[in-house]
Amino acid sequence: MLDNPFSLSLLWEVRYSLSSKTELLKELLLDLSRASQGNVEASAIISKSQGLPIYSLYPEGPDEKRIPEEDVIAGRTIQIQEATRKVFKQLKRGSLIRMLIEGESGYVIICDAGNDAILAVLTNKRANIGYMFFSMSRTARRIEQVLS
């Protein structure tokens, strides 16, 4: 199969496409982090159907030990979102737009990024929540475009 030039070309296109999508997703998460003025501690794009991280951005240095592994963030994000959607349906609150979870040392903000992706962001307490909502909505729309 790989001896066929057409197959090699197709294989290269798939690899190139995946590589360019990965670079675009990386840039989107970097832009979100920069827009937060350093208040984003970690961010992840998660597959709804598989519950696995598609792409994540983590800090380097001493803070990285405080942040859970990407698989933990992905799994818990899916669990939280599914449970919250059920609650919203039972309470007749309409469609879930985003979730904000506040803890002692920061926030977890979760929103949809298209039909099969979720954007999850961990911030410190200094984050401007309104601005994070705005920035995440914009980033989520762009993620949806990249993944479609």
Image (spheres, helix red, strand yellow):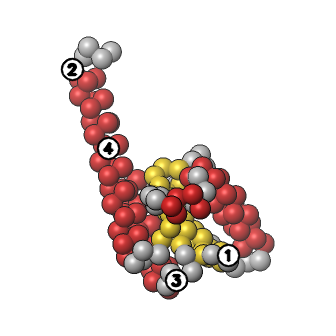
Identify the residue at horizontal 48%, vertical 71% (top origin). Answer: 40
Determine whether the residue tagged by mark 1 lies in a helix, strand or loop: strand
Q: Which mark is residue 126?
A: 3
Measured in 3D between alpha carbons, the distance from the residue under mark 4 to the one under mark 2, in whole angstroms, is 21 Å
Q: Which residue is mark 2?
A: 5
Residue 141 percent location from the top left of the image: 41, 67
Q: Which mark is residue 103?
A: 1
Identify the residue at horizontal 52%, vertical 63% (top origin). Answer: 63
Q: Which residue is mark 4?
A: 19
Q: Is residue 12 above or below residue 97?
A: above
Residue contact at pointers 1 and 3, CB within 8 angstroms:
no
Point out the tag, 1 or 3, that comes first from the N-terminus: 1
- Name the amino acid type tagged 1: Gly
Left or right: residue 123 versus residue 135 is right
Identify the residue at horizontal 33%, vertical 15% (top origin). Answer: 1
Residue contact at pointers 3 and 2, CB within 8 angstroms:
no
- Name the amino acid type tagged 4: Ser
